[in-house]
Amino acid sequence: MHELLTSHLNAPRWHIAFSGGLDSTVLLHKLVELSRQQTLPALHAVHIHHGLQAAADAWPAHCQTVCDALGVPLTLIHVQVQPGASLEQAARLARYAAFEQVLGVDDVLLTAQHGNDQAETLLFRLLRGAGVRGLAGMPSQRALGQGWLVRPLLGESRAQLEAYAREYGLRAIEDPSNQDLRYSRNYLRQQVVPVLEQRWPQATATIARSAGHLREALNLLDELAMEDLRAATAPGTFDWLGLPSLLLGPLAALSTARQRNALQHWLAPLTRLPDSVHWQGWEDFREAGASARPIWALGDGQIHRGAGRLWWLAPLWQAPTSAVQPWIEGSGSQVLPGNGEVRLAGARPAGRLQIGYRQGGETLALPGRGRRDLKRLLNETGLPAFARGRLPLLFVDGQLQAVANFPGLSASEARLDWLPPTNAQRLR
């Protein structure tokens, strides 16, 4: 535990995910004890209230009592769990979204998953047909929001934590839902693992150790992925879109297995990874004709194709753009709802200025070229089709005057510079 924490001693703050259960109570107590022996970052407990059961309403008061006794400040956060096929997954997503909001730059979130949790995770994912990435289990640390998620108890067993709690007389909450065998993890913990341990007493420790071996294999696959992605991440003409993208050619030249490995590495920070069934979508996407506009829909966004590249689009980029809006007099820049910001540069045209988007049929009078159809002009630029509907246009007295980020597509010296919306995604 101490060795893992050493690299984070300079963090501004350590947040402890504190449910009030035995595992997080032991973690909190251990950290307080450690803080009495050496200087640590400020400790701060965070309790997430999911509101999924009546019993949970009493837990914040218990957590506050424990934190007061240990001298650790506590923050209570209420979250709304979205309905879905898996309540466990929905609660987890809501919980980690809340933790991300709490973490400042380089802050650390400490969670209490232990060796038994690691073994159960591997069994659960094995039964779902996971590959090496899934079977590698929970990493001891990873990036989360602006900071880090660290699991310092992965090397300890549930029995060790229970013994620690008895030694120090720690009181903990017992979540009634932990007895509900409808939840897969509870079933594994109560019905499967005890049977395994009757035959193999060290089963959970051995399974957790296997997860460690698979984590090492995953690290090697990640090294191969980074090598394979090097050629595919060369700069492109439309990097100003600010979107994650890869050159399709170098990627398609790899074997199918290496394509999947490289894409998994690239997609991991962006979305939930596709299962074996949904990988067929990648093959259809890759093999689509040059004139096609294929879309590969994933859990948290879409991949589009354009300009010889594949592009990751978060939901923000899939939302419709707003209607025409007038230019605010006297301002040099203007925020576009859901679509970033534009700045007006060069000589300001006389007349009524508006910012709008393509509706179809627009034409632009270009010096020396006459009036040209906007659709044809954009075809000449090679701008990916998905970006054309979001590209801001400058209108003067109802006539198209300039196309954002293309200085050559302007009827005068006026220029419209567009800073597209960010495509930020939560780390998964």
Image: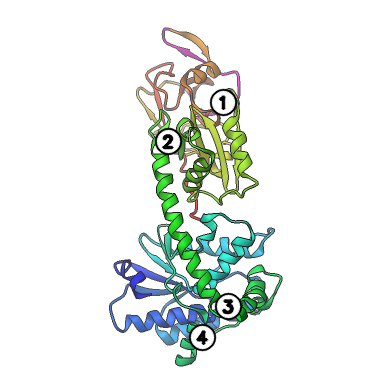
In primary-sequence order, the first of circles 1 and 3 is 3
Q: Which residue is mark 1?
A: 358
Up-down: is 428 above or below 53?
Answer: above
Q: Which residue is mark 4?
A: 162
Q: Which residues are magenta?
A: 352-368
Can residue 334 be seen here?
Answer: yes
Q: Amino acid at mark 3?
A: Trp
In primary-sequence order, the first of circles 2 and 3 is 3
Do residues under tags 3 and 4 come within 8 Å of each other at their CB atoms? no
In primary-sequence order, the first of circles 4 and 2 is 4
- Pointer 3 local density, CA inside 10 Å: few below 14, some 14–19, many at least 20: few
- Pointer 2 local density, CA inside 10 Å: few below 14, some 14–19, many at least 20: many
Residue 89 versus residue 127: which sits nearer the camera?
127
Mark 3–mark 4 Cα distance, whole angstroms, equals 21 Å
Q: Is label 1 in a helix, a strand or a loop? A: loop
Q: Amino acid at mark 2?
A: Ala
Do residues under tags 1 and 3 come within 8 Å of each other at their CB atoms? no
Do residues under tags 4 and 1 come within 8 Å of each other at their CB atoms? no
Q: Residue at x 54, y 74 (%)?
A: 204
Q: Nearer the viewer, mark 4 or mark 1?
A: 4
Name the image quarter holding residue 11. bottom left
Q: Is label 3 in a helix, a strand or a loop? A: loop
Where's residue 80, x and y in %? 61, 63
Mark 4–mark 2 Cα distance, whole angstroms, equals 50 Å
Mark 2–mark 3 Cα distance, whole angstroms, equals 47 Å
Can residue 90 be seen here?
Answer: no
Q: Amino acid at mark 4?
A: Glu
Residue 69 versus residue 349: which sits nearer the camera?
69
**Which of the numbered marks, if any, corresponds to residue 200?**
3
